[in-house]
Amino acid sequence: MNITTFNAFKSRNYRLYFTGQSISLIGTWMQKTAVSWVVYSLTHSKFMLGVTLFASLFPSFLFSSIGGVVSDRYNRYRLLLITQIASMIQAILLTVLVFYKEYHIWQIITLSAILGFINAFDVPARQSLVYEMVDDKKYLPNALALNSSMVNLSRLIGPGIAGLIIEKFGDDVCFGLNALSFIAVIGSLLLMKLPVFKPSQHKKNILGEMREGFRYVKNTPSIGLVLLMLALMSLFVLPFSTLIPVYAKDIFKGTASTFGVIDSFIGVGAFGGALFLASLPFGRNLKKILAINTLVFGTGLILFSHIHYYPLALVFAAISGFGMMSQITISNTLIQTTVDPGMRGRVISIYAMAFFGMQPLGGLMIGSISQVIGTPDTVLLEGLIALVIGGIHFYFLKKFPFKAGSLASTETNLSE
């Protein structure tokens, strides 16, 4: 790691954003961990873990295309403020519900679905706004990689804290701390000084602009291929995370802390992978790195799937996390550094559909499969699928070299 790892911090607005989001995301991962633990403790059902994931992500799939159009049409800064305040209210409602102890699984799932709806508008606005926060656009890939390091450092810290708090103080405290964490990100947004928003004229209605976004992706194969591969990973491989509570409770005979530690080690690997990407010099082929790390991801899952020695399982979980991180970060970077600025919100919304939309479907499928063949064999199968997708990446890399994916050409693309 060198000084270039933090080039994006030269921008004041991005520094504020990074600080506020870092605190808020720790709370978000605490809530995710607590929700999974509450659901599995309440139902002892692997399938219900998949249903919870479905409820939290599928609304994003349904409405993110609308969220992308709204992000391109209106003030992204104000939209992000609204979604963050709405997320805070959702966390408060979850805290109150669990505090009084008289809750049912459908209430947890309903609140998860509400958060998924909010995220359909939050993700396109937040991801698109990063472009405006970075003063020197050649540092955009660095900012996106630092975003991933932020997310994965939070994943490293949040679940571990959540496990301890659940055992010592209870689930409601976990949810309450997440609600408080939104103060940091809302405060950082209010301190920003962004260019005055200038609304542009829109000749088409919202439905027409949605179609225009899909048509743009269809006519831009370099972006379409990245989105397709991400969708396949989200459907078949990334839902492995829904089965981690099963490993913690049934395979390793542990507690909420065990769950938190496994999730944290996945975060360790992902954080390391994000710092690796942030430290890459200009000129590296990101698509090749994506292909290699997809193979790393699959290998890590295969090694983790049937291991019964807990310390070694943590090592393999970290390897999986390292490879997993690239699916999201590099895909996002390849899109953001090549997409037409006027299409940014809509294309990012399609990216969100590929990521958020396929995972809930995959979660239901993986939960059902694990009920039949068992959790270890299901994770083994997911690892094998990741290897196949990695091979597909290499096939298209040789057939269609993607020069825009290298960091060297990013500056050129952004200036066009």
Image (cartoon, rainbow, N blue to C red):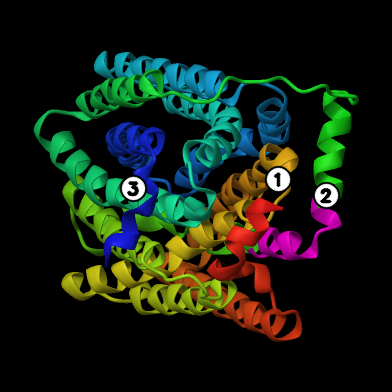
Distance (Cα) linking label 2 and label 1: 8 Å
Q: Which residues are magenta?
A: 217-229
Location of mark 1 (residue): 347
Residue 175 occupies quadrant: top left
Q: Locate residue 58 relative to residue 258 in the image: left or right.
A: right
Q: Residue at x 29, y 25 (%)?
A: 184
In the rendered structure, which amino acid carries the disc numbered 3? Answer: Met
Question: Which of the pair 222/263 is nearer the observer?
Answer: 222
Q: Residues within 10 Å of mark 3 (few under 14, many from 20)?
A: many
Circles 2 and 1 in contact, beta carbons < 8 Å? yes
Question: Which of the pair 221/200 is nearer the observer?
Answer: 200
Q: For the residue labelled by badge 3, is the local secondary structure a helix, a strand or a loop?
A: helix
Q: Residue 357: which disc?
A: none
Q: Is residue 222 magenta?
A: yes
Q: Which image quarter is the N terminus in?
A: bottom left
- Residue 359 lies, with reference to residue 268, above or below; the image says above
Question: Which of the pair 72/317 is nearer the observer?
Answer: 72
Q: For the residue labelled by badge 1, is the local secondary structure a helix, a strand or a loop?
A: helix
Q: Can residue 95 be seen by looking at this rendering?
A: yes
Location of mark 2 (residue): 216
- Residue 134 lies, with reference to residue 68, above or below; the image says below
Distance (Cα) linking label 1 and label 3: 23 Å
Residue 233 occupies quadrant: bottom right
In the rendered structure, which amino acid carries the disc numbered 2? Answer: Tyr
Q: Locate residue 314 relative to residue 344 in the image: left or right.
A: left
Distance (Cα) linking label 2 and label 3: 30 Å
Location of mark 3 (residue): 150
